[in-house]
Amino acid sequence: MDRNPEQDTTRPQELAGEESVEATAAPSWKDVGRRVARTAPRLREVAMQALLLAPLLGPLADDFWGGGGSRGGC
Amino acid sequence: MSGISPSTTLDFDAALVQWSKESKILAPPSTWLALLERLSVALGGSEPLVKRFVFIWSRLYSATLLLDHLQDQDELGSSWLAAQPVSLQYHLAFSAYASAQYELAGLANDLSPADGARLHELWSSLVLQLAIGQYRDLTLSSGSLAYDQQALDIYEELAGQKTGAAFALALGGCTIVAGGNIEQVDAIMDAGQMIGMLLQYQDDLLDRAEQNIQPGVLTLARAVARQFGSGANDLAISVLWSLLYRRYAQGVGSIIAVLPRSAQDIIGELMVTMFGSVPDLPAAAENHAVWSAERT
């Protein structure tokens, strides 16, 4: 059964303290990685699609680079 | 170029700025920095604090680029720096990290205690990821992979740990300095992570002609060749970039929907500045890609 934490006098003090720390804690990079893995396509899947698509696109292809070229990776 | 002779001995502070000021290769473009500042201000940040954070991040990023270029023996873009002994070049990279850390501590003291603590924690954990990612990159050669099927997964992880972490830190830090809430910081860090990974992919694909002098390094084109048993031609590489950019742009767009419209627009502008406009793909190809994605 759900209990209202504010009315729960048996609730340990330490738990309330942990939650208040959690509320201001910095985000974890591991959490970022997990969320991005759910949102971004897997590189191997996109690479496979590109290899399959390239021969089909040959006659249509022009330049897909889009004019960027920032060159700042490390 | 500043006109300072390569043989001139500079004091510590002057040496620290000389190479990043002189080299366009080792400094993030000013257009990116201006957009990061605008993003933080749009989220409610005070301009002086925002400018300090963006300056500190740019010093960290320059230090990382310097280390990477030294380790890869790439051109440094600064005649003064190139003329220094290698030991001093490495020391200047270390010094830039130390200086950035010192400046960050000062900035954190000027934020609320909670935001200062969040910024410290974010900074230290993501700089550590950068270090781990670079270590893995240096110790992993494309010939040492146990299974070819892992090549693209490992490359993807490295891109996330290196440039992904650097941009998660840039955007996340801008949001913390602006006093952003947890939901905003999470969303913007995810977007920064994806933007950084995309930058790593693009940089690597554009650099592939010059990568022949480093045959042991795991690059994106080599990871494709290892995983699928054959090299990708220029057209396949071009299509790969097109698909990656389109999918990542869609992903970033959905992640940042929780942010104010002005912040969303600035992130969109940042992506166009970094990567150009999202490339068109013929409708038939788009449909084929969606179809094959659904089957995998």
Image (spheres, coloured by chain):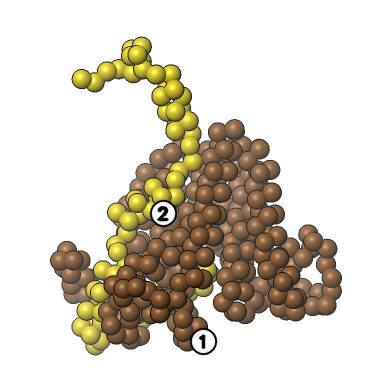
Residue A24 at x, y = what percent? 48, 34
Q: Amino acid at mark 2?
A: Ala
Quadrant where the image shows the C terminus of chain B:
bottom left
Query: Which residue occupies the foreground of this view, B31 or A73?
Result: A73
Quadrant where the image shows the N terminus of chain B:
bottom right
Of pointers 2 and 1, the one earlier in the residue sequence: 2
Residue B261 shows up from this direction: no
What residue do we see at 77% from left, 73% from top?
B2
What separation in Å lies between label 2 and label 1 (alpha carbons)?
A: 33 Å
Query: Which residue occupies the foreground of this view, B118 or B39?
Result: B118
Element type at mark 1:
helix
Residue that mark 2 sits on: B191
Q: Are marks 2 and 1 on the same chain?
A: yes
Image colour assigned to chain B: brown
Q: Quadrant of residue B5?
A: bottom right
What residue do we see at 43% from left, 38% from top?
B182
Residue B293 at x, y = what percent? 20, 66
User: Is B66 placed left or right of B210 in the picture?
Assistant: right
Query: Which residue occupies the foreground of this view, B172 or B224?
Result: B224
Residue B213 badge: 1
User: Which label lies toward us, 2 or 1?
Assistant: 1
Residue A42 at x, y = what percent? 30, 64
The yellow-tinted chain is A
The number of callouts visible is 2
In the image, residue B122 above or below residue B30: above
User: Is B44 placed left or right of B234 in the picture?
Assistant: right
Q: Amino acid at mark 1?
A: Ile
